[in-house]
Image: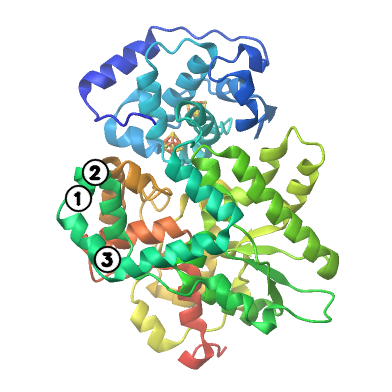
Amino acid sequence: MLQHKTYTDETFDKGRKDMDSTVVTAVSSHIPSETNELYLHEQAQRHLHSLLTDLGERGLYDAAAQCNRCGYCETSCPTYMLTGREPISARGRNQLVRLLVEGRAKDPSIAAESLSTCLLCGACSSACYAKVPTPDIVLEGRRALDGYGDNFFARAAVKTLLDAPRLFAFWLKLGYLVKKTGLPRLAAKLGIYDFLGMPGLAEAEGAVGHVPLRFAAEILRKDPALHPQGRTSVNWAYFAACGPNYLFTDVALATVRLLRRYSGEGIFIENQCCGLLAHNYGRLEDAREFARRNILRYEELKAVFGDFPVIADCSSCAAFMKSYEQLFTADADWRPRAAAFAAAVKDILEFVPADKLPHAAQAELEKAGKVTYHDSCRACHGQGIRQEPRTALRRLAGKRYTELPESDWCCGGAGAFAFTQPELSSRVLDRKLRNIASVQADTVVVGATSCLIQINHGLKAAFPSARAVHYSSLLDELTAPEAGGGHS
Ligand code: SF4
Ligand code: SF4
């Protein structure tokens, strides 16, 4: 496990000295794995073979070496902006990974802290002229330093999700039933999680409100309209990402209604988890297996229905699936299949045709109040989606729509970051909340599950009259014919 350290001037100074005292020289264009000091050759399968960067396919060292330390991204990096600490900026992180690969990181605890505190938001890559893929570089370092997610809980959760998804759903429902008894809240209040050394669980308990006892996949699997007989083409396939499936069932159902309303007939792909959790928490081999199963399912359906887009409604998952090819760069069979699947993936944020949207229902518009849009990191930085949702929201909400200052500043959710780094996460969130308050927004539209949890958690405490809502949910509410929407 990485040691999560408290941020002090002492650790900063130590880290800066460590980095500044080392002059990194440009070395060969490729470091073979046997000279890679970050991980042993036997662990190579648990790492990416190469990274697909904007400047071409690169080994880890060369990808990190694309960072010329210009510092142009520094003001985009939330962790740097909040702490002013070089080791936890993009430049610092890339530098530390280079040192780790060279075996020259003098104090690995600095690297551990640096890599574990990255939000993986990608704001640095958006700002960078060379588009250095810092989040992927950070993850490569983390995998090795973090022990490849081999601890009991991570392994058990991922393996159950992979090999026994129905058992996973059963355990989750059991946990939700326990939550409904109020016992976890009581445990949080009594400080039991702190006592057990897991304060993040108290955060998690507080952040998640309503929990469903019937998951989206269970509902959609039984919908005959999503399993059309005798058809040879469909306009879309819905991919139930874990957040909408297991936690925000209403989002998943809203997405399917929207797709039907504006894109005609479609199917439910009956997917597995996209693999992002396994990917981000060290278990790359498991992430590849999730990907292979989803690709196989897509290919089976493609043989029946021909080409169709695969629509996901969590931007983190959509962005990850668009990068599936990178998981298989050393695999001649799976690489092109992964690339074909990735090309079919669309985020609901970019898929709803804004020009087909009708006037919104007046009552629903009034309920929404002043609407603004938060750019989920993996939508804007991960997929370049910025304009499409804004166009749709402006069309629907008209003058009620307002731009959010620093809309692409991360909310601090970042998967499990809010639970693993609660102190830093709440500082990142605080700036988001101040920006929301500055425009007096009532409804904050988001495209990713962790943003929905994190922003609502913050709003509940600081600005309770406002709410965060998923893009699909709001569009569905505003355009539902039964609510009076749909008239042009
Ligand atoms: S990541 Fe890019 S913008 Fe940031 S310091 Fe490196 S080269 Fe400059
Ligand atoms: S991914 Fe985000 S937190 Fe990490 S270095 Fe880049 S901007 Fe900073």
Image check: 430 left or right of 358? left
- The quarter holding residue 210 reads bottom left
Looking at the rendered image, the quarter that the C terminus falls into is: bottom right
Q: Is residue 311 above or below residue 359?
A: above
Snapshot colouring? rainbow
Q: Nearer the viewer, mark 3 or mark 1?
A: 1
Residue at x-position 27% and y-position 66%: 440
- The numbered mark, 2 or 3, whose residue comes first in the sequence reads 2
- The numbered mark, 3 or 1, whose residue comes first in the sequence reads 1
> Pointer 2: residues within 10 angstroms few (<14), some, or many (20+)?
few
- Of the pair 296 and 61, the residue shown nearer to us: 296
Residue at x-position 46% and y-position 90%: 483
Q: Residue beneath label 1, please?
A: 192
Amino acid type at image mark 2: Leu
User: Tag on residue 61?
Assistant: none
Amino acid type at image mark 3: Gln
Where disc 2 sits, the SS reads loop
Residue at x-position 25% and y-position 53%: 202
> Pointer 1: residues within 10 angstroms few (<14), some, or many (20+)?
some
Q: Residue beneath label 2, please?
A: 196
